[in-house]
Image (cartoon, rainbow, N blue to C red):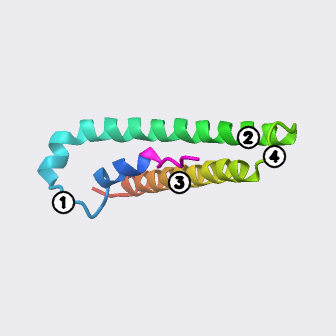
Amino acid sequence: MNISQISGVDRLSEVSRYGSTTDTEIKTSGRDTFESILSSAMKMVNETDQLSNAAEEEEIRFAIGETDNWHDLMVAQQKANISLQYTVAVKNTAIEAYKTLLNMQF
């Protein structure tokens, strides 16, 4: 069984606090970066949903006796679980960053 990578990980380098971008680069590409991060987040949510649906289908197949392969069931469940944990972690980080921006005093 092929275990694919989570596609949202590739886009994290753009928002890394340790990146090498300068302030002028951020100002000129702020809109493009936000749009790309938002679309990447939406893809990540969709991928998490697809993996969750695949795990549920595998559970149903196992429950009704169509398959007796524990390995496929466990792999599907773990992929869905890891993807959900990653999505929640990214969401929590985004909310924390938003709250930090709201609390800044100018």
Q: Residue at x 82, y 36 (%)?
A: 66
Q: Amino acid at mark 3?
A: Tyr
Circle 3: element type: helix
Q: Residue at x 41, y 51 (%)?
A: 9
Compared to residue 54, the image places residue 15 above or below, namely: below
Magenta includes 6? Answer: yes
Answer with the quarter of the image where residue 37 lies.
top left
Q: What residue would you read off at disc 3?
A: 86
Residue 53 drawn at (x, y percent): 67, 36
Disc 4 secondary structure class: loop
Give the mark, 1 or 3, whose residue is nearer the N terminus.
1
Neighbours of disc 3 within 10 Å: few (<14), some (14-19), many (20+): some
Q: Is residue 53 above or below residue 27?
A: above
Farthest-out residue, right: 64
Between the C-alphas of marks 3 and 2, the distance is 21 Å
Cα separation between marks 4 and 1: 51 Å
